[in-house]
Amino acid sequence: MSQTLNSSSSNATPAAPERLVIASRESRLAMWQAEHVRDCLKSLYPQCDVQILGMTTRGDQILDRALSKVGGKGLFVKELETALEDGRAHLAVHSLKDVPMVMPEGFDLACVMAREDARDAFVSNDYASLEELPKGAVVGTSSLRREAVLRAKFPHLEVHPLRGNLDTRMGKLDRGEYQAIILAAAGLKRLGLESRIRAYLPYDPYTPAAGQGALGIETLSKHPSIKHWLAPLNDLPTLLAVSAERMVSRQLGGSCEVPLAAHAVWDNNQMNIRSFVASVDGKAICLADGVGQVHTIEEAEALGLAVAQDLLAQGAADLIPHIPK
Ligand SMILES: NCc1[nH]cc(CCC(=O)O)c1CC(=O)O
């Protein structure tokens, strides 16, 4: 279709965008991610003016309470969604882990980009691994999922909450408030802090959260042309894996008020997925693995659904306050 034909028809998607504004949180990691998306868009559409609109979310402001107690995941995305609704921005870039499992009415998860390392990382100035930490050592994490595994494996350690952006968290470690902290490896690598990682925690038993390490781009459902422009940025292996992970999480209530892990890998049309639901003290755990041939998002979601049903059959609902049994 020629350029003239395109622009004369009001419904057709123009061949290339002229201007795109990306809404982003202002933390260094969020900005890195927004700049990464900007650079990808610039190389796809060299004529396009791509801008970043930085903003503060409630999740960035509330630092004194655990996320699970103040409303969870939506906290990091709401203000960005308002910017989309107001037309101040065309797309919002998020860590996929922070994107609610059910998208709010009128918004789409338009694109999922290639995943960074999805593992959790052990960071400490004095110790090389969790195993080396002495009795009573304080480990920082605000993730109930990480806390449950730590309490199950290392009952002699103290697990204390740790909030704030990556720089804040590293600062607290370096001032000696914690002997060690657990963070997503992806954020550390993106910010050039890989050398601070003393150990990578293996997927078993340290299964990550659904979507960990992946970037998601959100748009208004009523702007399919933007979704169309973003399509080349999708990474199929990541998209299929996170579709399965997010289905598990969605079936189990999709909140961060419960220790819930889901991690899938798709390779050569085969998907392997592992998920667990645990009690925060780590004493009760339901664990399920799935494996199957997957070629489409629907098949990925079907595998995620099967894993969720397996967990529920093991009694996972007893560990989750809000879902009916
Ligand atoms: N919940 C906060 C959050 N959201 C995304 C990341 C890290 C980057 C990623 O997983 O993509 C983090 C920090 C962490 O878990 O250490």
Image (cartoon, rainbow, N blue to C red):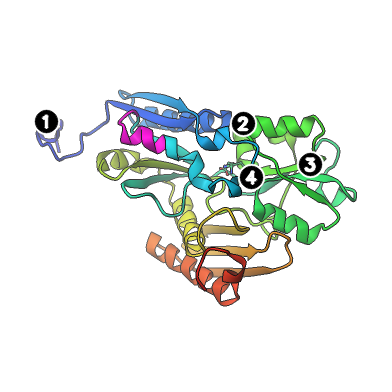
**Circle 2 is placed at which residue position?**
191
**Circle 3 is placed at which residue position?**
180
Earlier residue among tags 2 and 1: 1
> Would you place residue 174 above or below residue 77 in this image?
above
Residue 233 image offset from top left, x and y in percent? 40, 41
Q: Amino acid at mark 4?
A: Ala
Q: Amino acid at mark 3?
A: Ala
Earlier residue among tags 1 and 4: 1
CA distance separating discs 2 and 3: 19 Å
- Which corner quadrant of the image does residue 140 belong to? top right
Residue 155 image offset from top left, x and y in percent? 82, 58
- Give the magenta range: 80-88
Residue 66 tag number = 4
> 254 or 31, which lies in front?
254
> 115 or 323, which lies in front?
323
In terms of secondary structure, where does tag 3 sit?
A: strand
Tag nearer the camera, 1 or 4: 4
Mark 4, Cα crowd under 10 Å, few <14 / some 14-19 / many 20+, is some
Mark 2, Cα crowd under 10 Å, few <14 / some 14-19 / many 20+, is some
Can residue 267 be seen by looking at this rendering? no
Is residue 82 on the magenta stretch? yes
Q: Amino acid at mark 1?
A: Thr
In terms of secondary structure, where does tag 4 sit?
A: loop
**Is the Cβ of the residue at disc 2 closer than 8 Å to that at disc 3?**
no
Tell me if the residue at label 4 has its CB under 8 Å from ligand 1: no
**Circle 1 is placed at which residue position?**
4
In terms of secondary structure, where does tag 2 sit?
A: loop
Earlier residue among tags 2 and 3: 3
Tag nearer the camera, 2 or 3: 3
In the visual, does 91 lie left or right of 131? left
CA distance separating discs 2 and 1: 43 Å
In the rendered view of the protein, which quadrant contains the N terminus? Answer: top left
